């Protein structure tokens, strides 16, 4: 199988990248172009909210959020849902006091908005949609601790599961899972698809977070802008 490409509905190849390559993209975008993590995270969260609304207009929605960039995107998504009076509950995989940086700021904003934020699922209403924003390409395998328990919980609901960037527990580069993993019906992956998404992601939507094409050029990653006039597009693994 062609391990390095996905295809858009109009037949354009989209290069798949490893976790390391995606980290390089983040680094160059931030350090050489000044595109901040918060700017990219906000676009991730808004695109993710669009996918939630496509799955269910009424909710209730539970957003499972970790402490890294993946979690931050989930918190931004929760804000957009709350602004549309969709019943949303955020479940953090740690105490709010353990959050740092941009993710802590995203939490503060939700808290000031009065959005329901928990650190355990025991009293959470059964959701229509679960958003998996626990772990993205930052997985250091295998899934352990609260994220693993939250994945178990999600897997045992009847909810539609939507993963941000990479299904939690899946290695973004290899697609391997040495431990428990979540099984989404849809994954909203950011900037470029990861090589580990070939078999595990459910329906794959690629979200634009405005990484300049020049960043990929700098890193010699083959890239032609795939989004046309959209900000999120369906992509499928190429088979060869
Ligand atoms: N250009 C882009 O693609 C952007 C992507 N964004 C999102 O940020 C994440 C990557 O963020 P990072 O902070 O590097 O890591 P993660 O959030 O994926 O993971 C850290 C998170 O996961 C927990 N964790 C790690 N390993 C384990 C484990 N074995 N068991 C349990 N928990 C684990 C850790 O504790 C942290 O909570 C990327 O996927 C995108 O979603 C940015 O938003 C913008 C640019
Ligand atoms: K995830």
Image (cartoon, grey):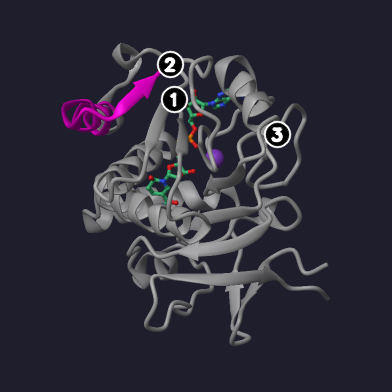
Q: Please identify, in this view, whether the residue under mark 3 or under mark 2 is nearer the observer.
A: 2
Q: Is mark 2 within 8 Å of ligand 1?
A: no
Q: Residue at x 39, y 77 (%)?
A: 230
Q: Residue at x 56, y 46 (%)?
A: 163
Q: Determine which residue is flagged by label 2.
A: 119
Decide if residue 137 is in sight here. Answer: no
Instruction: Please provide percent x and percent y for residue 191.
Output: 45, 61
Q: Are marks 1 and 2 in contact (CB under 8 Å)?
A: yes
The Cα atoms of the two marked residues, 3 and 2, are separated by 20 Å
Badge 3 density bin: few <14, some 14–19, many ≥20, Cα 10 Å: many
Q: Tell which circle, 3 or 2, labels the residue nearer the N-terminal end.
A: 2
* 111 drawn magenta: yes
Residue 11 shown left or right of residue 74 in the figure: right
Of residues 109 and 159, the one drawn nearer to the viewer in this rendering? 159
Of residues 68 and 76, the one drawn nearer to the viewer in this rendering? 76
Decide if residue 224 is in sight here. Answer: yes
Numbered badge on residue 181: 3
Instruction: Please provide percent x and percent y for residue 40.
Output: 31, 52
Q: Determine which residue is flagged by label 1.
A: 91
* Residue 172 vertical placement versus 95 (above, below): below
* 221 drawn magenta: no
Range of magenta residues = 104-119
The Cα atoms of the two marked residues, 1 and 2, are separated by 5 Å
Badge 1 density bin: few <14, some 14–19, many ≥20, Cα 10 Å: many
Instruction: Please provide percent x and percent y for residue 116.
Output: 32, 26
* Residue 229 vertical placement versus 213 (above, below): below
């Amino acid at each position: 199988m062609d391990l390095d490409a996905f295809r858009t509905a109009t037949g354009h190849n989209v290069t798949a990248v490893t976790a390391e390559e995606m980290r390089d993209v983040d680094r160059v975008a931030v350090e050489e172009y000044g595109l901040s993590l918060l700017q990219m995270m906000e676009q991730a969260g808004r695109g993710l909210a669009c996918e939630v609304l496509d799955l269910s207009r009424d909710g209730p929605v539970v957003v499972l959020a970790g402490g890294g960039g993946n979690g931050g995107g989930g918190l931004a998504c929760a804000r957009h849902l709350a602004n549309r009076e969709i019943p949303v509950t955020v479940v953090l995989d740690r105490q709010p006091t353990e959050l740092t940086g941009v993710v802590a700021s995203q939490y503060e904003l939700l808290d000031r908005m009065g959005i329901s934020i928990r650190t355990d699922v025991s009293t959470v209403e059964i959701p229509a949609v679960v958003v998996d924003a626990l772990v993205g390409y930052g997985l250091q395998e295998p899934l352990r601790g609260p994220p693993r328990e939250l994945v178990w919980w999600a897997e045992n609901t009847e909810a539609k599961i939507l993963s941000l960037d990479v299904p939690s527990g899946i290695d973004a580069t290899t697609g391997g899972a040495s431990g428990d993993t979540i099984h989404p019906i849809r994954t909203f992956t950011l900037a470029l698809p990861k090589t580990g998404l070939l078999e595990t992601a459910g329906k794959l939507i690629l979200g634009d977070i405005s990484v300049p094409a020049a960043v990929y050029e700098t890193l010699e990653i083959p890239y032609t802008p795939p989004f046309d006039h959209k900000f999120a597009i369906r992509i499928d693994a190429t088979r060869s």
